[in-house]
Image: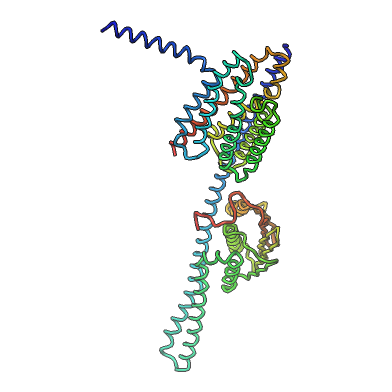
Amino acid sequence: MDNIKQIIVLATFIFLLAPLALVVYVNVYNKRKKKHIEEKEHLKGVFQQELLKTHIEVQEQTLSNVGREIHDNITQVLSFVKLNLALAGNISAEAQKKKINESRELIARAINDLRHLSKSLNFEHIMQHGLLNALQTEADRINNSGIIQINLRIDGDNYSLGAQRELVFFRIFQESLNNTLKHANASRINITLQYSEQLFNLTIEDDGMGFSPDELEGNAGSGLKNMENRAAMMGAETALYSSPGKGCSLRITLNPNKKQLYADGNPPNSIS
Amino acid sequence: MAHHKIMVVCVLTYAIKFAISRMAKYFTIYTSAELICLITALVCLFRSKEYYWRLLIPFMLVITMVEFASIPIKALYKANPIPIHSTVWLYNLLLPVQITGFAIVFYGFLNKYTKNKILVITGAVLLYLIYIAELLTNQAGLFNFNSNTYSAMSVVLVVYSLYFYYTLLKSEEYAELKYLPEFWWVTGTLFFFFGTTAINLSYTYILTTYPGNKLYLAFITNVLIIILYGCWSYAFICKRWITSNK
């Protein structure tokens, strides 16, 4: 009799305890979910901020390039044209004709350069046409300037990585190009874009003086760290190979199918 | 004049005392809990936008009415224990109402989190089939309690509740459980039907073997009833609080 009472009480106790344990579990899981959502939102916010910063930096860099181009190239050409026209007054008709033709060619060159520059300025247009187009435009611009020779190679069929990712890739390219122009003393840059189903690789190589990555300090070190962080935010991995006298190679690898929680390949609302 | 007034007061007091003494037997733990829950439902859910919340008012009304109606019938059965005097037929009639009510409410709750409600529909159809089969095979028809249907309903409702928790946790949106009315309603349901499953399964065996244990079973059921209607009433209050905040 007592056994039965105990069994009833025990069975009911267990049958009450089981849902109680379940409710506690649901509650704990829900709290974890809240924490996870908050972390996700935080990362999303950080990513959006970083993306906005990237966007501004790309525009600043573009404007700086345009400014330099106007100063170093177009202004020089136009000054030369002005000089030509000033001299044309006191020379023979044959020489005048030569000077005018020369000036016309120079103005045509200046117009051509300005056309290229306007394309550079129209950043949104470049990004709409994709990373490959943007890199091609930049490579053409640099090659025309004669500062350095850029070779662009594409392996595989190109596809879009999404506006956000492509913007970050473009900014990494700009940063890397700046570093090469400022510090590497290189004569050639090789850019390789490898497109495959599972992998995308962007490799930027130069034949400059190179450096020891372990000894990077100050701004150079933080610049590289910045590139690594940005790449990591979109789920990419960065690898840097360099040694003194042997140039430098920067490779960024991304699995295009890997969806980051906060970088889904869509244009960010904050800047689009 | 003063004499008349005293007389009226005396008569009224007596009438109230008489009414209370006669009515007191109607207020058991079951009926009191259900009545409180019904009043809370009336106050909190009357203006609810969702049909399944509003449905809980007539649902509670039917349950409360059945519970109140069962009291005089029980007294009748005690005086003359013949099948027609038992409350079994009343609870048998309540079963399809319960199956329908629970299915609609769970359907509405799950609709918020998932489009897949096949589980709810299958469960309800299965319970109707068991109910009809049991009713047809019962020797005394409506006067034999459909205990298998009730046990099956308990299991199905536990499965519904677990499925609700699953979809709630799987959902990408975060919900504050403290104030989530659906969560409290389902929790009450889960506690009650999970707890009563043990009793349902052993009820006949225990009572035939050891009739003295009815008291323990009644006590446990009372506790479960308080948990059920406590959770439901709180859910209704949460619902009202959320609605008024919206």
**In front here: A209 or B12?**
B12
Quadrant of the drawing holding the N terminus of chain A: top right
Residue A210 vs residue A160, the one in the foreground: A160
Q: Residue furthest left?
A: B1
Q: Between residues B178 and A165, which one lies in front from this camera angle?
A: B178
Q: Residue furthest top?
A: B3
Residue at horizontal 26%, vertical 7%?
B1
Q: Give the x, y percent position of residue A243.
A: 70, 58
Picture coordinates of residue B49, whole percent (x, y): 47, 40
Q: Is residue A266 above or below residue B121?
A: below
A271 displayed left or right of A23: left
Q: Is residue B203 left or right of residue B51?
A: right
Q: Position of residue B219 (x, y in %)?
A: 61, 16
**Residue B46 falls in which quadrant of the image?**
top left
Q: Is A89 placed left or right of A27 in the picture?
A: left
Looking at the image, how many numbered discs can be counted on the residues?
A: 0
Instruction: Specify the quadrant of the image occupied by residue B111.
Output: top right
Q: In x, y percent, where is residue B38?
A: 49, 27
**Up-down: is B168 above or below A263?**
above
Report whether residue A201 is seen: yes
Tell me what residue is drawn at x 60 percent, y 66 percent. A135
In the rendered structure, the answer to whether residue B48 lies left or right of residue A17 reads: left
Residue at image position (63%, 37%) is B124
Q: Quadrant of residue B206?
A: top right
